[in-house]
Image: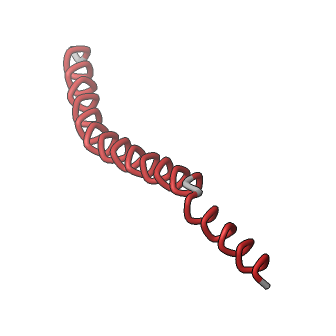
Amino acid sequence: MSNINAASSNSIATLLNDESGATAIEYGLIAGLVSIAIIAALTILGDNLSTLFGTVADTVSTASTP
C-alpha cells in the first residue's frame, strides 16, 4: 500500500510541475490578442482607405469631365 501512495504522490507532483499546457494557453492568448489588434486596425484603416479612394475617384471623374 505504501508503494501505491508513493506512486500516486509522484504522479500528482509530476502533474503539478508540468507547465507545458500553461505555455500553450499563453501562446493561444497572445495569438488571440494579436488577432483582435489586427482586426481593430483593419477596421479603422478600412474606413479611412474607403474615404481616401472615394475622394480620389471623385477627383479623377471630375478632372476627366470636360
Residue 36 falls left or right of residue 59: right
Q: Is residue 45 above or below residue 35?
A: above
Residue for point 33% across, 45% down: 37
Instruction: Work out whether 55 lies above or below 11.
Output: above
Identify which residue is drawn at 31% across, 47% down.
40
Residue 39 to residue 50: above or below:
below
On the image, the x and y values in percent for residue 9 come to: 65, 73
Tell me if 53 is positioned left or right of 59 in this view. Answer: right
Q: Nearer the viewer, residue 11 or 39?
A: 11
Q: Position of residue 34 (x, y in %)?
A: 39, 44
Location of the C terminus by quadrant is top left
Apparent side of residue 42 relative to residue 27 in the rendered image (left or right)? left
Residue 11: quarter of image? bottom right
Q: Nearer the viewer, residue 29 or 3?
A: 3
Q: Nearer the viewer, residue 64 or 7?
A: 7
Percent across and percent down for residue 61 are: 26, 22
The quarter of the picture where the N terminus appears is: bottom right
Tell me what residue is drawn at x 62 percent, y 65 percent.
15
Q: Position of residue 30 (x, y in %)?
A: 42, 47
Determine the residue positioned at 20% across, 29% down: 55
Is 35 left or right of 53, judged from the image as shown?
A: right
- Residue 3 vertical position relative to residue 44 in the rendered view, above or below: below
